[in-house]
């Protein structure tokens, strides 16, 4: 399998797993992988089960369509912008994960209520400001998990949604206690040097 074929397979596999993993509903998510010529991204408006490797759209990093018969995901602009800005990012998984979305509706990020928050790369997981979907404003209205490749981004999306679920449940009982900055710095450092699933 060529690099391009294996990247296409990884994108399709991730897209098809979003809903079974419980991190998306319907077809509102989108997945992309960086490739030699730019990025491969899921097409707009096609159910994942009916999406095949040839349906992915090849875009240059400036958004020019290089190959593909379908329109790219309506969120193509922020995928392109992230790859332009972050050379180390190889995969992006954008989902409307239910618990992350519930927190986003309250304009709440996820603070350091649990050491696993550090897995996302810092002491908290901020909530991006609202912006119209598909707009140049680079809205991340639920989760845009970034990783060195698509499987890493998918794993991070799953981890963040699990944290969002626990945080939502903890909020029902009261205001969760937070870990201090020293502890989160220590844990973040440990995750950076840790195993194949650690993501940027
Ligand atoms: Zn979206």
Image (cartoon, rainbow, N blue to C red):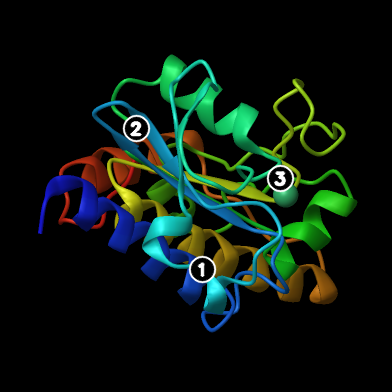
Specify the quadrant of the image occupied by residue 144.
Answer: top right
Q: Is residue 47 above or below residue 10?
A: below
Badge 2 is on which residue?
89
Task: Give the label, 1 or 3, closer to the camera.
Answer: 1
Q: Residues within 10 Å of mark 1 (few under 14, many from 20)?
A: some
Task: Give the label, 2 or 1, closer to the camera.
Answer: 1
C-alpha span from label 2 to label 3:
22 Å
Upstream in sequence: badge 1 or badge 3: 1
Badge 1 is on which residue?
51
Upstream in sequence: badge 2 or badge 3: 2
Q: Is residue 151 above or below residue 143?
A: below
Residue ID at (79%, 67%): 171
Q: Residues within 10 Å of mark 3 (few under 14, many from 20)?
A: some
Report the front residue among 116 and 57: 57
Image mark for residue 109: 3
Indicate the position of residue 28 as horizontal and vertical percent values: 71, 60
Instruction: Look at the numbered discs 2 and 1 and tell me whether their residues touch, using CB distance below 8 Å.
Output: no
Task: Pick the quarter of the image with the N terminus.
Answer: bottom left
Q: Residues within 10 Å of mark 2 (few under 14, many from 20)?
A: many
Specify the quadrant of the image occupied by residue 136.
Answer: top right
Number of dots carrying numbers:
3
Report the front residue among 189 and 135: 135
Q: Secondary structure at mark 2?
A: loop
Q: Secondary structure at mark 3?
A: loop
């Amino acid at each position: 399998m060529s690099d391009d074929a294996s990247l296409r397979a990884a994108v399709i596999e991730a897209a098809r797993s979003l809903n079974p993993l419980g991190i998306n509903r319907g077809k509102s998510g989108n997945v992309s992988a960086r490739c030699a010529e730019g990025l491969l991204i899921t097409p707009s408006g096609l159910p994942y089960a009916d999406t095949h490797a040839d349906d992915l759209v090849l875009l240059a990093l400036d958004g020019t369509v290089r190959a593909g018969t379908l329109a790219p995901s309506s969120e193509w602009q922020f995928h392109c912008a992230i790859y332009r800005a972050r050379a180390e990012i190889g995969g992006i998984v954008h989902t409307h994960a239910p618990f992350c979305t519930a927190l986003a509706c309250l304009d709440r990020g996820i603070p350091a209520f649990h050491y696993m928050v550090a897995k996302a790369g810092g002491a908290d997981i901020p909530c991006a400001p609202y912006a119209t979907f598909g707009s140049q404003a680079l809205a991340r209205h639920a989760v845009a998990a970034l990783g060195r490749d698509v499987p890493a981004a998918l794993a991070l999306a799953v981890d963040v949604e699990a944290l969002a679920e626990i945080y939502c449940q903890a909020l029902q009982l009261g205001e969760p206690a937070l870990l201090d900055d020293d502890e989160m710095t220590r844990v973040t450092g440990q995750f950076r040097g840790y195993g194949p699933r650690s993501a940027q």
